[in-house]
Amino acid sequence: MTVKKSATPKKSLAAAKNKDEGKILIIVESPSKAATLSTMLGKNYIVRSSKGHIKDLPKSRLAIDIENNFEPEYILVKGKAALKNELVKLANSSSKILLASDPDREGEAIAWHLADVLGVDLKQKCRVRFYEITSNAVKAAVKNPDLIDLNKVDAQQARRILDRLVGYKLSPLLWKKIRYGLSAGRVQSVALNLICAKEREIQAFIPDPYFIITARCEKNDNAYELRPEKFHGESLCKNNLPLLINTQEKADEIINEIKANADKIEVMEFKSRNVPHTAPAPFRTSTLQQEASRRLGMLPKITMSVAQSLYEGLNISGKSHTGLITYMRTDSLRISDEAINSAREFIAGNYSKEYLPENPNVYAKNSSKLKIQDAHEAIRPTDINLKPDDIKDKLTPDQYKLYDLIWRRFTASQLTNAITAKTTLRARAGEVLLKQEGEMLIFDGWSKLWPLDLKGDELKKINAGEFLDLKSVKSEQKFTRPPSRFSEANLIKTLEENGVGRPSTYATIAGTLEARGYIEKNEEKRFYPTALGMLVDEFLAKYFNRKDLSSIVDAGFTAQMEKELDEIEDARRKWLDVVGEFWHEFSDTLQEAENAERVELPAPEPIGEQCPECGKDLIKKRGRFGEFIACSGYPECKYTRPILTTIGIACPKCGETHGGEIVKRKSKKGKTFYGCSRYPDCDYISWNKPAGLTCPECGHELFKRGSTVYCANCKYKTQDDSQDDSL
């Protein structure tokens, strides 16, 4: 049977074909942002996503013509042919094309490549930059397009070429001289060097003893705890520690002097002064990553992903789809006048008048050397009236925690100073001058929303000339500690302070080094280098730390390179000059390193046991997720087992009955968790590190993060300083 097709009028076919003709085409980076803008801009706009870069350097080869002025070979990104064809077709039928990739160097390069693919004239004002995804901001930006910033494109291209030259020339060198499959990067090599240098400091550190002497006194039912400041007129302190009380004999001598004058410990002075504390600056990318890591335990990569979702927007009751924060990749501390006025109105309407400063708090240009006049702002909520708790049900737990952090920090930045009273008590016991310092909050100001760390407890006033009653005096021996290893937050802070890297790179640096097997995290989430990482760092430092333009492991020279990229963006330097000068030095150093002898990796370490399957020696090996035990007879024998590191705590489920201990393990994805040494006979498991204690308030198990001991069931929290978390 033949089915008759319905006839469609030719006019209707043409209308369907040309339904998008004459509209304005806007191209953004992400699909979710495209969906957001579509709801804001209406039917006269077509919004599509490039899904990141449309063109890039190929992964399979260097693709930089060094002999021809470092000409890069850009190709269509694999898998994007259909997308390119769709965009070209839409561009050909549109009345106008607007390129709205992210407002940073990477986004500018994406817009430039899109212009090339779509045949957009670079003299045409086609570039749109969204610094916040709100209806007013989006519509205003679309009405006022700009030119593509070719200086910014040049800066991104210079960075891309430099990184490609380093990565694709240095990695094969490491294959030849150390082991196949290794790799190196321009910024990551500096981070590795910092971590390795810190480890060498720790290994070379020799602890020195010192004694803390505490004299507990009372007066009028008020307690005081004083410590020796001077003995026979000579200072006992160094770096705020009593390092000069370094023998038991000296400690005993000081204690005996205090006891001998127990009935005449006279107050020499009691001083109190009010100290204003200025409000913290709003977040920029690096400080957001640091505080999210420190306060929320959130990895920088996760922080940036969650921040991206907050920037791109959510459906909020009464406001439709709106972005909750401004653009999250920024080094600027600038706040727009509109945002400051909005914050001041909010503060005036929600807090008493003493919380609103007479003039707005304005934050000076930060040390990252970027232009404060640029269109970027600090990271802030787009609408301060959207309080975190009011929209909590619209957010995921991570979105809520990060939005709350950003909202509180920004709002606090526009509140008045916090004021504390800092007090100093000095008393004399014979030839010993005793001292105690305290601090008390007088007015909370901005600390109403953001924590203020007080140094010392409140000291009750006492008058000079009064005498204290000595209750006890004792000494405690301690030892100086080695420098702490880097946490994720501290590493980012150090890189930023040294001018190394940019906001877009911070989130991935540590993860890249971990993936390469160069560094690992200990139980306290601090980085330490593996033997392989130390070996790679030693090799790179030997040949690529010559105090010239090839010094890729030296923070100072890498920071200088970042400065030169800024100068390209500011049109003060040509990208070809910067790349050419670097390559001249780098290629000479490469050639020298090519002639070096091969570095031998340490032989696998036997553990003193035989394989239960074939009888050969068992050895320590390193895999994707760290060290493990394997048979030396591999590949004939494939026996392996994990290395179980005990943490010195009995299993809370079977420790008393069967002697199970808590051991550190790795999941299949490389994430650390804690389980019982008797697995599978005991199935105890925890993603959090057990503290071996029970909560005094609810009786549940306690866990430990750094020096903080906390309960996951209730809000109980305390500090445990008995163990150095840097070791």
Image: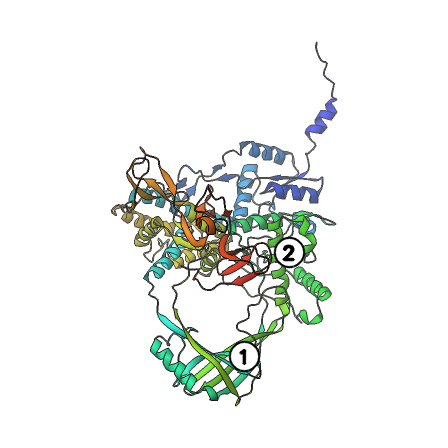
Q: Amino acid at mark 2?
A: Pro
Front-most of residues 427 and 444: 427
Looking at the image, which residue sits at the far front? 657
Q: Position of residue 249 (x, y in %)?
A: 34, 78
Q: Residue 594 got which mark?
A: none
Is residue 158 visible in the rendered image? The answer is no
Q: Position of residue 419 (x, y in %)?
A: 60, 74
- Neighbour class for label 1 at 10 Å: few (<14), some, many (≥20)? some
Residue pointed to by mark 1: 223
Q: Position of residue 604 (x, y in %)?
A: 30, 44
- What whole-number distance in Å separates the C-alpha atoms at marks 1 and 2? 46 Å
Q: Position of residue 169 (x, y in %)?
A: 35, 44
Q: Amino acid at mark 1?
A: Ala
Looking at the image, which residue sits at the far bottom? 465
Q: Please, what secondary structure does the residue beneath circle 2 have?
A: loop
- 670 displayed left or right of 309: left
Are circles 1 and 2 on residues that touch, CB within 8 Å?
no
State the quadrant of the C terminus.
bottom left
Q: Residue at x 48, y 50 (%)?
A: 155
- 56 displayed left or right of 311: left
Looking at the image, which residue sits at the far top? 1
Is residue 588 visible in the rendered image? The answer is yes
Give whichever of discs 1 and 2 has the lower sequence position.
1
From this view, report whether residue 533 is shown above or below residue 710.
above
**Quarter of the image where one finds residue 20:** top right
Q: Please, what secondary structure does the residue beneath circle 1 have?
A: strand
Front-most of residues 1 and 399: 399
Q: Residue at x 57, y 32 (%)?
A: 85
Residue pointed to by mark 2: 381
